[in-house]
Image (cartoon, helix red, strand yellow):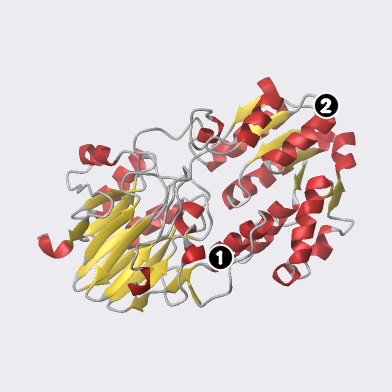
Amino acid sequence: MRIIIHRGADEIGASCVEVAYGTTRILLDAGTSLDGSVTVFPDDINDYSAVIISHGHQDHYGLLESLPESVELYMGDVAWGFLQSLRIFTGQPPLAERSRICLKAERPFKIGEIVVMPYLVDHSAPEAFGFLLSAGGRTIYYSGDFRAHGRKAKTFDYLCDRLPREMDAVLLEGTLINRGNSHFSDESKVEEGIIDAIGKEEGLVCLSCSAQNIDRMVTAFRAAKRSGRVLALDIYSAWILRVAQKLSKNIPDIRWDGIRVLSHNKVALGQYRKIKQNSGFFGDFVRELYHSDNELWEKDIVDSPSRYLLKLSDFGLAHILQKLRKPSTVIYSQWSGYLDHDSSAYNEPAGALKALAGERFYEIHTSGHATKEDLERFVSQILPKTVIPVHTNHKHMFGALFSQTIVLDDGEVFDLAATT
């Protein structure tokens, strides 16, 4: 078996890893760069047998728009639904429907000469997978993005129990290998932090987080309910929760008590128009948005701000705060790098929101990635012969943790046949 990290050996994001055996060539992930730099498929993409997407984050699927129809695509249904939804709500046309094989946890499949076993992992995106690939008596595990401190933390221990020992190689993500996991070590701590912040605020509490981080949306609903508030969402967030219902009926939905949708204001009008333009994709959902038990007007929030935990886009939250003109709390529950003026990842709407909130701006977040300690725990349990860093800015730190580390550069070929 051969491994080539086409991109991702020296950066977080833009993940694109080739595993090949004989004439079979598979790409694991096809992501775009987080810093906006140009990323493309390998020139000979038409010669690949398949592309497998580990989860629904753009740094793992962003190149799919240019994937040739002749190349098989493997991806989870919810991840595909999130991808299409994000495109529609950001004003891009949905990708053309194409042949796509739906990934299911622990349902193996064969691509050419390689057998692939997907394993469900805990991550800040739902339906995230790692993959065990086997061919010619060799085995490789690709971790994708994973962690051990989310609402599906038990999947970490389950994964360690299920994976074979002493496999030939692990392609291991290292997003957090050089730093800690903020002040909130797990999702339950985030929930308590949000409740504490709500308890200090007599007016409106705003929440900035990714709607596609379903763990965080569950946390938001639980925190609002425990604090006696209603979770108010924008139309996009409400739809994302509906898509996620395919995974579990325990995920909050606008049909539940304690959730309402801000369906009457300037931002909502723009989102409504996108739904109407793609009515076949959304079905009857638009009718539910404007049911009297679900809908909210902007005036409802302005008149009674203390009733709500408001989760909108950063732009939408800033619009409400400017209308309200009263002291309000903003809980920022995303990666802090988006607030760093000196970073290429700086997000201007997030920075504006922070300026509006002033001293009532709280960063309450936990990462979607494994800590250094959990990476060590993972490797110590499965005992791979080789550890290959991916999805990291600090690949040379792996050697201090794992003596079996082999560091690759983008484009370098690593042939397992050359190892003992």
Lower position in the chain sequence, tag 1 or tag 2: 1
The amino acid type, in three-letter code, at marker 2 is: Arg
| Image x and y of residue 157, in percent | 38, 53
Whole-number angstrom distance, CA of label 1 to CA of label 2: 40 Å
- The N terminus: image quadrant: bottom left
Give me the residue at 44% from left, 50% from top.
Answer: 38
Give me the residue at 11% from left, 61% from top.
Answer: 418
Residue 164 seen from this side: no
| Image x and y of residue 41, in percent | 39, 61
Residue 236 seen from this side: yes
The amino acid type, in three-letter code, at marker 1 is: Trp
The answer to whether residue 267 is above or below residue 244 is above
2 left or right, relative to 366 = left
The answer to whether residue 79 is above or below residue 22 is above
Q: Mark 1 points at which residue?
A: 80
| Image x and y of residue 179, in percent | 38, 33
The answer to whether residue 320 is above or below residue 295 is above
Q: How many residues crowd mark 1 within 10 Å: few (<14), some (14–19), many (20+)?
A: many
Secondary element at tag 1:
helix
The answer to whether residue 124 is above or below residue 360 is below
| Image x and y of residue 348, in percent | 61, 34
Nearer to me, 378 or 327: 327
Q: Name the residue under label 2.
A: 325
326 left or right, relative to 374 = right
